[in-house]
Amino acid sequence: MKKDKVTFAMTPVSAVQVGKKRGKSKAVAIVLSITAAVLAVVAGGLFLWNAGIFSLPGLPQKEPEPTKPFTFAADTKVSGLDISGKTVSQARMFLKLNESAFVPPKTIAVQIAGSETSLTQEDFDYTYNIDEVVEQVVADAENKLSTAECTYTVEAKVTDLSVKQAAEKVCEEYNAEPVNARVSAFHPFANDRFEIEDAQDGLTVDAENLKTQLAAAFASEQPEVTIEAQTQNVPATVTAEYIKKNLVKLSSYETTSSNTDDATNNMKISMEACSGSIIEPGEIWSFNDCTGDSNLESNGYKSANVISEGKVTQGIGGGICQSSSTIYNAAILANMGIYERYPHKWASYYVPTGLDATIDYPNLDLKLENTSDFQMFLECKVTGYTLHATFWGFRNGDYDEIRTRNEQGKTGDKSYSVRAWRMYYKDGKKISEEELDSSDYDLENGVNFTSAENDDHVVYAGPGPLPADAAPSTKATEATS
């Protein structure tokens, strides 16, 4: 059998076409090689970046793996406190929270003028070398020393400020101002009018010396220390003897009631209410405070003539203005400060004009001030129809006697004025004078003026000259010449 011959027909290809095909294959191979190389580089870079060896542009920085923090080895102790396994910051915090454990017990007994007080370590503040000790423990650990076999101690050092404050606290507790002798009770018109409470000396603790001794007590490092504070007595300036020698009658003033019996009764009630008053230095004395509500029958007051709304009428407590006016004049002669005073609508007949003091509870009051350095005392009473007021107090060496004077001022269509003064005398000569509150009176009853010159109501008008062995007392008068 005859086999058919297979003929392959080939399309004619030029040499140029063959060359182009071969060149293209070669270019593809080159590109593939370059790509593989780049990928290899990138892969290597990614590996190195991932390993944290270096960073690639455009890629985030790879954070290195955190190193394990330093912690103290087992059995590491500071002043007996275990800091094993703690970081440096944790150890510092732990030690600072336990600072009180580093302060050794301390008791300091302070003896003060026969008394004793105690201070302990808790009364003071301290500084601690915690940071320094922790740094030393770290350094020893880094140098491979066995910190468990080393001894580390935090020292507590008392602060100078807390020592100073402790000394000042003791001084504040034991320092005592001297207490002057004083009159503790006053019995008007009795033979022994005054009960005198004796003086007490004061005490001062030497704060600087105490501070030095406290600091030395801590330096001794002994748990119990006894020290004795240095003290100094401070004597009182006013003794009982001084009071007995210088407490005298300052003034006495009397008026006579020509009013009704009920009005005189009211005067007696009000004078008795004021009697026995003790007026401390700088204190303001009030007539109304002593009498209470003089409009109440329950306080013992009766109905009598009073001036109300410019008219004479009946009212409970009528007549007590003569009591306040009597006390007012005695107060002027005793050199008391006049804090509050009011004149009547019409001039009073029982005292010199311009030297009256009206009362209308609770609206109008007579208030006097003790401007001296010592106590003052008021005793007053009504005997028959005579009102008596006396002030007691301490001698003033600036003057021997006080007198009053008055003069009529301007007269208007409806009123006239009166001026008044108190005058200070020494050895019979006037040395100064002080003008008192002026007074305006209505003219409805005409002008009534009674001169204060040679006032016969004055019983006693000054402490008299000082004894040769008596020191001047109280502050100088503020009167102007």
Image: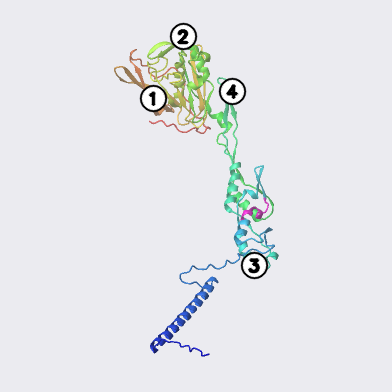
One can see residue 20 in this view: yes
Q: Distance between the residues labelled 3 and 2?
A: 109 Å
In the rendered view, would you say 377 is above or below 88?
above
Q: How far apart are marks 3 and 4 (CA)?
A: 89 Å
Instruction: Return the mark for residue 135.
Output: none
Considering the numbered disc 2 on the image, is that residue within a helix, a strand or a loop?
loop
Q: Name the residue under label 2.
A: 260
Q: How crowded is mark 1: few (under 14 residues within 10 Å), some or many (20 or more)?
A: some
Give whichever of discs 1 and 3 has the lower sequence position. Answer: 3
Give whichever of discs 4 and 2 has the lower sequence position. Answer: 4
The three-letter amino acid code for the residue at tag 2 is: Thr
Considering the numbered disc 3 on the image, is that residue within a helix, a strand or a loop?
helix
Q: Nearer the viewer, mark 3 or mark 4?
A: 3
Q: How far apart are marks 1 and 3 (CA)?
A: 92 Å
Considering the numbered disc 4 on the image, is that residue within a helix, a strand or a loop?
loop
Q: Name the residue under label 4.
A: 192
Q: Which of marks 4 and 1 is in front?
A: 1
Q: Name the residue under label 1.
A: 437
Q: Quadrant of the C terminus?
A: top left
In the rendered view, would you say 133 is above or below 355?
below
The question of residue 34 being in magenta is answered with no
Residue 47 at x, y percent in the picture: 54, 73
